[in-house]
Image (cartoon, helix red, strand yellow):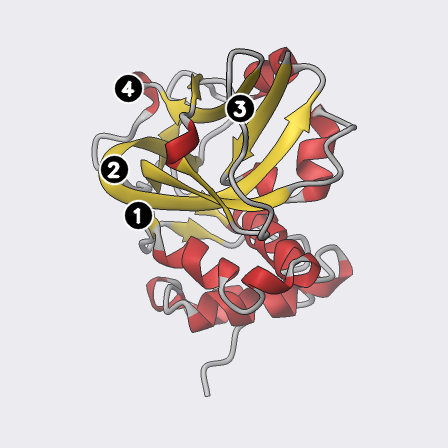
Amino acid sequence: MTNYVFGYGSLLERASRTRTNPEAVGAWPARVTGYQRGWFHQFADNVGSTCTYLGADKAAGKTINGVVYPVNDIESTKQRETGYTAVPLAADEIEMLDGSGPLKIGDDVHVYIFVSNPASISKTKEPTPTFPMVESYVDICINGCLELEALYRSVQGSFTQEFIRTTTGWNAYWVNDRIYPRRPFIYAPNASAIDKALKAGNVLQYVQLHDLGVQMA
């Protein structure tokens, strides 16, 4: 049996997903129909994680862009994705964006999307003062998008902005937890490109710009 994961948040970034599945170096850009991505996944009972993560939920007519990659051990990803349920996708719900054509899904091939459990979804469907977005997590997601744009000509200049545009819940409860936020490139080499992408996506309007270190000309 071959198992694939459709990653739409931190799993977009190679370094992030290979910490769980070391074999998941390669990944292909894709789009899934019938689901909504948003800043609404929270761990209310986990005192060690007081921020809002990206989640996904069923939503007719909505789309999510992300990556598809094979895994040797789907259970490792299930253990990582606490508060989510692995839901198998149908072939007609997945559009490959690398030009390779449709995935052949059958009895021996499954592609899983991790959907937020109802108990993990914020009542407001967005970050809150108690559970804000954190820049370190935003950085991972956007960096993953930029990695894909660098690898696949078919999504260059569009994948990152589609991610921003099709993600709900951007708001003012956004904390800049970068190490050395005034010089983020020391620990986040792609910080400048990430900030430019967020600015182009018109979501930095929700953040106090001096806190993020982005200049709005």
The numbered mark at residue 118 is 4
Q: Residues within 10 Å of mark 1 (few under 14, many from 20)?
A: some
Provide the residue designation for mark 1. Answer: 169
Q: Disc 3 residue type?
A: Gly
Residue 165 at x, y percent in the picture: 36, 58
Which of the two labelled residues, at mark 3 and mark 1, occupies the earlier sequence position?
Answer: 3
Tell me the residue at 62%/11% (across/down). 75
Q: Which residue is mark 3?
A: 48
Q: Position of residue 61 (x, y in %)?
A: 23, 43
At label 2, which amino acid type do we have? Answer: Lys
Q: CA distance from mark 3 to mark 4?
A: 20 Å
Eye-nearest disc, 2 or 3: 2
Q: Nearer the viewer, residue 94 or 7?
A: 94
| The label number, if any, that marks residue 121 in the structure image | none
Q: Do the residues bearing badges 2 and 1 touch, measured as CB atoms within 8 Å?
A: yes
How packed is label 2: few (under 14 Cα within 10 Å), some, or many (20 or more)? some
Whether 156 is drawn above or below 170: the answer is below
Q: Which residue is mark 2?
A: 125
Which residue is depicted at the point 58% across and 66% down?
156
Label located before the other in sequence (2 or 4) = 4
